[in-house]
Image (tube, helix red, strand yellow):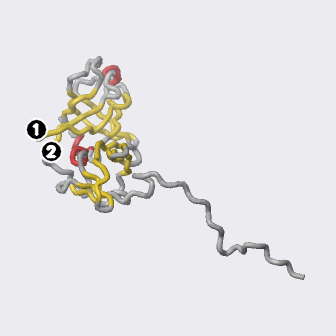
Amino acid sequence: MSSKTQLRVGRLTKAHGLKGAIKIELYTDDPERRFVPGAVFTLQVPTSSPWHGKTLELSELKWYNTHPVAFFKDVPDRTTAESLLKAILWVDQDLTESPDEEDAWFDHQLVGLSVIRDGVKVGTISLVEHLPAQDLLHVATDAGEVLVPFVKAIVPSVDVKGGTLTVTPPPGLFEELPDDPEDPEDPDEPDEPAPSAP
């Protein structure tokens, strides 16, 4: 079995200027490590693309108004840059390596973990989806797929070595809630109108 996997670290979104620069949507919390000069990325592009099966080598990553912009070797002009738009960048990752920061995991470490609620297994992580606001965990359960926001309040504990991820979901996330019963009568309200003063 291979000791490496691939991680998706970014997507090329828009040509920037005339010298081949391309804006990047980052899928990594560690761009300073992933996007260093000389870094090589595997490209995910349609089979019809002239870039299919090729790699890109980073020359430089710059920031313009908080937006990361990349310059790549062999991408000298805007026309070439535009042929790479929507390409997804992947890097090789050692399976035995863990992120440096606390409470951070690679997708391949989370997929396959058993999801535990109140000491009982309720499903298995099938996919980690990275959205702008937060990450979502796709959990395969007997009743179908459940999407769980990957936030501390709902996922307080991840035990990669133990193969489990503990959830404390709000009511209704993993089960259908019954319809609210009709509000009981307010005990403070009298059953009959109070008699008016004489």
Q: Is residue 43 visible?
A: yes
The residue tagged with tag 2: helix, strand or loop? Answer: loop
Residue type at the position of mark 1: Ser
Q: Residue at x 33, y 47 (%)?
A: 141
Q: Residue at x 42, y 52 (%)?
A: 175
**Is label 1 in contact with label 2 (beta carbons under 8 Å)?**
yes
Residue 38 against residue 190 in the figure, above or below? above
Q: Position of residue 75 (x, y in %)?
A: 27, 24
Query: Residue 2 has which mark?
Result: 1
Query: Residue 167 has which mark?
Result: none
- Quarter of image, res 160: bottom left
Q: Position of residue 103 (x, y in %)?
A: 26, 57
Q: Residue at x 72, y 75 (%)?
A: 190
Q: Whole-Å distance between the Cαs marked 1 and 2?
A: 9 Å
Q: Residue at x 79, y 77 (%)?
A: 194
Query: Which residue is denoted by mark 2 in the rendering?
Result: 95
Q: Quadrant of the C terminus?
A: bottom right
